Amino acid sequence: MNIEKKNNYTLITTNNNSFDDFLSSFKEKHTEIENKNIIIQISDKLNVIGKDIFVLLEHAKVHQQNGTTFVVVLKNVDVDEFPETFNIVPTLQEAEDVLEMEEIQRDLGF
């Protein structure tokens, strides 16, 4: 797992051999970054299915409660399988767009 601080968010990329390894590493580090906007970019090399991603939903809820953004980037995923409040997109650019939109909504008091 790589953690890279960007201008207004923290980018987390997977470099692990399995999603379970990534998840274990992420859970260890999450408390240090739970008050920051986070984008997780999951590698195409990992064999990830929808139910694997659902375990990140609990972390997304933490960010929603503390007023930060949590977005998962995963190509070839059916976003309709996930709750509307869970931000999952196919590209990093779309994740950055979601982050920007949520920051605008928070600034406007939504």
Image (cartoon, rainbow, N blue to C red):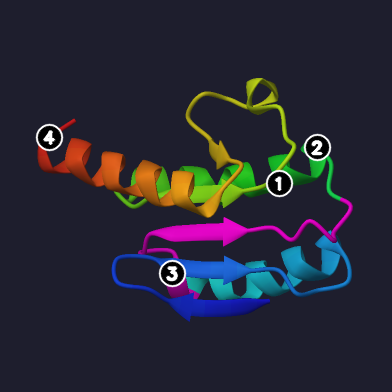
Few, some or many residues within 10 Å of mark 1 (<14, 14–19, 20+): few
- Report the residue marked by disc 3: 10
Drawn side of residue 41 relative to residue 105, left or right: right
Who is closer to the viewer here, 12 or 27? 12
Q: How many marks?
A: 4
At label 4, which amino acid type do we have? Gly
Does the magenta portion include 14? no
Q: Is residue 30 visible?
A: yes
Dividing the picture into quadrants, the one containing residue 64 is top left
Q: Is residue 62 visible?
A: no
Q: Earlier in the sequence, mark 2 or mark 4?
A: 2
- Report the residue marked by disc 1: 55
**Location of the N terminus (image quadrant):** bottom right
At label 1, which amino acid type do we have? Val
* SS for callout 4: loop
* Contact between labelled residues 2 and 3, with CB atoms less than 8 Å apart: no
Q: Is residue 81 above or below residue 2?
A: above
**Mark 2 and mark 1: Cα distance apart in space:** 7 Å
Residue 6 position within the rendered picture, expressed as x and y whole percent measured from the top left: 37, 73
- Report the residue marked by disc 2: 51
**Mark 3 and mark 1: Cα distance apart in space:** 19 Å
Q: Is residue 98 above or below residue 81?
A: below
**Extent of the magenta region:** 32-47
Few, some or many residues within 10 Å of mark 4 (<14, 14–19, 20+): few
At label 3, which amino acid type do we have? Thr
Residue at point 37% right, 65% down? 9
**Mark 3 and mark 4: Cα distance apart in space:** 23 Å
Q: Earlier in the sequence, mark 4 or mark 1?
A: 1
**Mark 4 and mark 1: Cα distance apart in space:** 29 Å
